[in-house]
Amino acid sequence: MNHKRYLCLHDIPLFSGLSMESFRQICSVTDKQQLTKGKLLFRQGEVSNRIYVIKEGCFKLLRMTPDGDETILQLVGPGELIGEMALLRPDKVQLATAISIEDSKVCSIDYDTFERIIKNQPDLAWKMIRNLGDRLYNLWEQVADANSQSTQEKVLSLMLRMAREHGEACTEGTRITIPLTQQEIASLVGASRVMVVQSIKELTMRNYLYREKRHYIVKGRCF
């Protein structure tokens, strides 16, 4: 379980720095949801009028290809914004499916209200732009890795990135707080599960990785 959580939206980096008066405008129009593991938050192709902020837990964002294959685009955890891409589209269609990979809590705000708020809060608008830029950069990084690395290198690059973005210090190194299955890793790096299993085994033998129940630990020497 990812133990990181935010008891109040005001603690989330996206909203930090807002005056309490401005924040109260957001909090008063926010809907709260609790989702158990495996539950759908929204589906690719749906017309949506809400954005979501993760307070606790994590989600995988899936994209269905025309051939019917599923690709994991990203794993997102506490403090992150999801569904915001539809905000930028005139048709308000979600570009991916969001599924909880552990028990989660989210808050949602309708687009019209959020748009009205960010027009009056330049700092919040700028943080959203940076958030979208980071998301785009990560996708470019994944594409570049997929075209230039072996499966083992892709797996290690993914683990290092996850440790930076969703890691917590532990005795052995950095524990990735988002639980990852071998199939999810395979989808994220664009390789077969068999190749991923072999890569994880080799990285473990070389003392780069260690598995602790449902979580992977990146050994300190990798940094």
Image: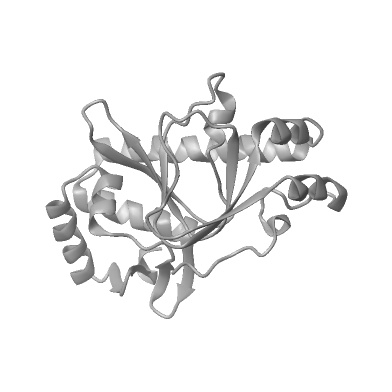
Image position, residue 162 (x, y; %)? 41, 56
* Up-down relation of residue 149 to residue 178 (above or below): above
Image position, residue 177 (x, y; %)? 44, 65
Taking the spot 56% from the left edge, 50% from the top edge, the residue there is: 80
* Up-down relation of residue 125 to residue 153 (above or below): above
Q: Tell which residue pokes out farthest to the bottom in this image.
A: 171
Quick check: can you spot residue 8? yes
Taking the spot 28% from the left edge, 53% from the top edge, the residue there is: 185
* Up-down relation of residue 218 to residue 48 (above or below): below
Write down the quadrant of residue 201 in the picture.
bottom left
Q: Nearer the viewer, residue 152 or 66?
A: 66
* Up-down relation of residue 217 to residue 105 (above or below): below
Taking the spot 32% from the left edge, 69% from the top edge, the residue there is: 214
Work out which quarter of the rendered image holds the C terminus and state it: bottom left
Relative to 29, 70 lies left or right: left
Relative to 118, 153 lies left or right: left
Total numbered badges shown on the rendered structure: 0
Relative to 156, 44 lies left or right: right
Work out which quarter of the rendered image holds the N terminus and state it: bottom left
